[in-house]
Image (cartoon, grey):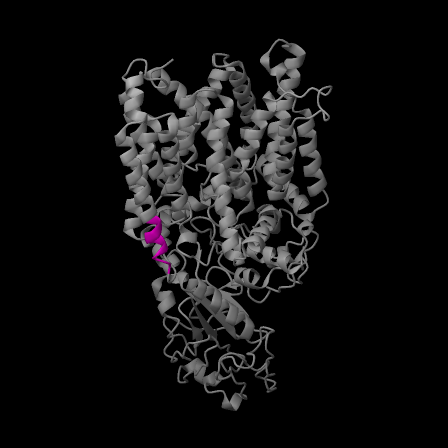
Amino acid sequence: MSTYTQSPRSNETTSTDGRGSRIALTIGFLALAGAVLVAYAAPADGYETSLYTATPLPFWLGVVTALLVAVPVVIYSPRGYVSTAGTLLAGGAVVAIAALPIVRTYYFYGTGDALTHLGWTQDLLDGTLSAFGLFYPGIHTYSAFTRQVLGIALPRAMLLVVLSILVAYVVFVPLCVRSMTTQRGAVTIGVLAGLLILPINHLGMNYMSAHPITDAVLLTPVVLYLLINYFTSHTDGFESRYPVSSVGILLAITLGSTVLYHPQQAANLIIFFVTISSVQFGYRLFFPASRVTEHQPLYGQTVFLVGAFMLWSIGRGRYQNSVNAVAREMTSFLTGAAGAGGAVGSRASSLAAVGSGLVEVFLKLFAVSAVFSALAGLLMLTSLGGRLRDSPDTDAIVKYFTIGLVILIPYSLVFFVGSISKLFFRNLGLIVTFGTILGTIALYRYVSSLSEFVSADRVRLVLSVTFVAMLALSLAVLFPSPYVYQPNEQVSEATVEGFSTTFEYRAPGIQMYGVREGPWRFQQGLRGVRGTRTEKIDRAISGENITEQFPENRYFAVTGEDPVRETLVYDSLRYSRQNFTALEARLGTHRVGANGGLTLYLFPGTNATVAANGTTPTSSASAGAPAATPTPGDGAGPSPGAATTTTTSPTEAGPTDEASRTGTGTGTTASIFPDTEASAATAGPEPGGSAGPPVTDPPTSEPIFPDTDVPPDPASRDENGDDSGGGGDDGESNGGDEGGDEDGGGVSGSAAVELTAG
């Protein structure tokens, strides 16, 4: 036995039961408790550019203290209650960081797909949508259940669900290691490896926005834990009432749940399970004396998973569109019409535009993952060479995982082509999950071998420093931030209230535009997806066209985070500071209202007359017909008791069309936001040029990274009846991941749009 795994009793007494460890743990727990209290006492009062820099420094000092105490205690004390306490302290510190949006009372997290998932969940609660109408209802039903049981707001319930899934990942990674090997030292390393949360890469795997494919991958260790124990469970049909073990039943239930969380992850597991079943069949045929033949065959579970997947997916439009998109992109790649890594190439140019590059971002996102992947690769080579020499069960299970990955990795590379290349990073998150488990076993083997030549204390010291460094690198990229050229995905309460009022009282028939994309996601998050029309709020005005004149009236919504994201995070790649400041000086611009989280402007068109309140223009200036008075609650006008907006004739309207065009008029507006004063932007000279043609489509250039890309093609949403309030055959109206907001950037074209679901 190596000196790393077993020390003399005197050393064990000193490291495990010593007074120093207990004192250090006490300090660590107090520091962690203080850190959480400090964070809770500093709730977010607006949009924060970075969650990391906005969180008070004492929180970080407390968490760092806890980790600096916990990591050495776990490594130096591999057994006993002190080790357990150290494990709880380390886990508590990481979970405290992961829970920051909840602790600091963010209203919600995720401005893209997460808002659509929030809307779907609200539809479930309202009874307007059945769980069977969703392609991946797992996280939605879980969130609805949590909301009903705890009696809390739905956005907060969804954040708690996402956090609980991450906690499951942290818990089950070391449990998988424990089930694969009997070595306690490997489990110790597995505890720390699980805290690294390596699957998150912000290219196809995101946190902590609600994202079904990410959640499905983070739950993979639960599946693997049951799978490992299923192999070694034995059931005699003559001694048991049922010819299946209890672990087998739990595994089948978990596999069925995986299909509901995301069918793409279920498809990955099908590849993995079919491979293992083939290995077992081959060993039973050619090597009947092998340990593999003593394991429970996986045939039944594989058939069940395939059946559940086909029963749930076949016949759904989204599934068919996804298959067609992959086939189309593969055909284009094989014929030379499309290259590999298209999404990566587009991001490389965007990164270069802001003074960065792929190498820098790769090191930030994948450096630690690369270390564990390399360790896992060495273990896989050792297994394939038959030189593992561990326990028979460990050898067999490592061989299962090795051969499974040998098939799964090339299968994943199929997605690294054309416009769907970002989907590869989803599968990469799954591969890294396997790599974390196998890399842990490999690291333990090498550390144990090294401790035979170097003192155990020196090995432990190096291991402690290494894991502290890896934790720092990994946790720094747990949330999107300017550090990785991504904006904080915080949704502030002020922004939600602003959009809620806007959608209720805006004038009918006027298109609403936004920065990068229209506010249709907020419409879905606030009002649900079913029956919610978005064709009037799904487009953007590019930065260079903000000051242009358009034939028709247009709303332009600017959230509190838009200027920060565009100028600080994206370094004015699409919108500059001047673009935003020019809004107030734009010809005839009406600032309809502002509440700190949302500012709503009305751009009067050259062919329409705008009422003085800026909210209810006439339907046709040329016809001279009076504007209809909007009715409350239909997104057209105020209800009784709300901020008043009046409908006036063109002669009463204040700035006329001519005044707006020449800059001589003054727009007087009545605020549609509660508790805010009406304000108006005085029309002034239009900076930078003459009137140009209207811009009805958002810019098509690729952003730096996901989550803020061009909106999906409305035509692709209409295919499923999205904008007519139906949701097509899947009930997934206008949203999901169709815009690619959480996946690594949107893609033009309906085929790729459909494929990015989840």
> Taking the image as drawn, is residue 711 in sight?
no
Q: Residue at x 61, y 50 (%)?
A: 141
As rendered, which of 270 and 589 lies closer to the eye?
A: 270
Magenta-colored stretch includes residue 538: no
The N terminus is located in which quarter?
A: top left
Q: Residue at x 55, y 72 (%)?
A: 504
In screen coordinates, is 168 left or right of 727? left
As rendered, which of 55 and 309 lies closer to the eye?
A: 55
Compared with 347, 302 (above or below) is above
Q: Residue furthest top?
A: 289
Compared with 416, 140 (above or below) is below
Query: Could you tell me residue 305's position as x and y percent?
Result: 67, 33
Q: Is the stretch drawn in magenta largely helix, strand or loop?
A: helix
Query: Could you tell me residue 533's position as x and y percent?
Result: 62, 65
Question: What is the count of numbered marks?
Answer: 0
- Snapshot quadrant of residue 570: bottom left
Q: Residue at x 68, y 44 (%)?
A: 320
As rendered, which of 166 and 612 lies closer to the eye?
A: 166
Compared with 574, 89 (above or below) is above
Q: Residue furthest bottom?
A: 651
Q: Which residues are magenta?
A: 35-44
Query: Could you tell me residue 159's position as x and y percent?
Result: 49, 51
Query: Could you tell me residue 386's position as x and y percent?
Result: 50, 12
As rendered, which of 492 and 30 lies closer to the eye?
A: 30
> Taking the image as drawn, is residue 269 in sight?
yes
In screen coordinates, is 635 left or right of 676? right
Compared with 113, 618 (above or below) is below
